[in-house]
Image (cartoon, rainbow, N blue to C red):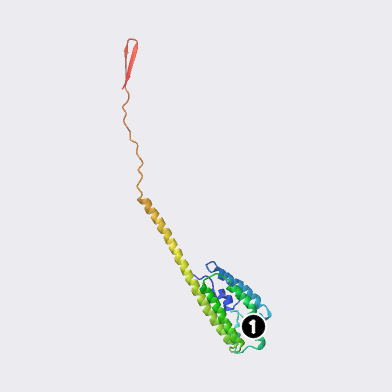
Amino acid sequence: MRFVALAALVVLITGCAQTPRVVQGPFDSFILAQKSASECANKIESSGAGLTVSREILALRDDSASRVALMSSGNFLTDDQAQALLAYLAINEECRTIARGFYGPQALHNAVSAAFGDYDIIYSRLVSKELSIGKANQERLLVKQRTEATINALFSGVQQQINQAAAEQEAARRALATQYLLNQMQRPTYQVPVPQNTYKPPVQTNCTRIGDTLNCTSR
């Protein structure tokens, strides 16, 4: 059982401003942090620099109208586009801080940090005109897929541990119930004493009269 749809979950890690679905589980803190970071990213995209980046530089959304063109573009950044990207990234640091603010396994923190670092390498190569816009977006997609796979493996591993623990608890409950019944069946049977009837012959009374005196005896 997967905790979330990972394409939505890693919104800030992958740079896509999509709202993740909150679920119950041991990674609630991580998921809620990504939700808050997503809201932060949505606000940034509505700014001047954010609009320029999403329309002319980075395919931030899978359903973006400019996604296909950006993924295949052979153009390099103009000076104005480079300044817009740098401004966007500076503002986005606040969202990254939010995305990092969760309680969870160190491996999950490592995955988040690695993704942010890989994106920064791509952005630096893009600004320095080492990468075209299309090539940068293609490399971003690879980072996204790698991050999703890493986080999915972490979630799957924890879910297996939860399932195993639940199965062990249920087995223990069954064993206790079975043992209780066996103990009850092995207890000595209580015999209800049956009262015994003791025969008592009827009392016979004999009386004799001597003159005016009546003498009676019983036996």
Q: Is residue 171 above or below residue 211?
A: below
Looking at the image, residue 84 sits to the left or right of residue 184; the answer is right
User: Which quadrant would residue 168 be assigned to in this image?
Assistant: bottom left
Picture coordinates of residue 157 (x, y %)?
47, 71
SS of the residue at dot 1?
Answer: helix
User: Which quadrant would residue 89 be assigned to in this image?
Assistant: bottom right
Q: Which residue is painted at 50% across and 76% down in the image?
A: 150
Residue at the far right in the pictured view: 48
Q: Is residue 19 visible?
A: no
Q: Is residue 168 visible?
A: yes
Residue at the far front in the pictured view: 106
Q: Which residue is painted at 44% across and 61% down in the image?
A: 170
Q: Is residue 72 above or below residue 164?
A: below
* Residue type for callout 1: Leu
* Towards the viewer: 194 or 127: 127
Picture coordinates of residue 57 (x, y %)?
62, 84
Looking at the image, residue 120 sits to the left or right of residue 193; the answer is right
Which residue position is annotated with label 1? 86
Q: Quadrant of the C terminus?
A: top left
Q: Which residue is painted at 58% across and 82% down in the image?
A: 120
Dot 1, crowdedness within 10 Å: few (<14), some or many (≥20)? some
Picture coordinates of residue 18 (x, y %)?
60, 75
Instruction: Please state the total of marks drawn on the protein image.
Output: 1
Picture coordinates of residue 187 (x, y %)?
36, 49
User: Which quadrant would residue 199 be assigned to in this image?
Assistant: top left
Q: Which residue is painted at 33% across and 15% down in the image?
A: 215
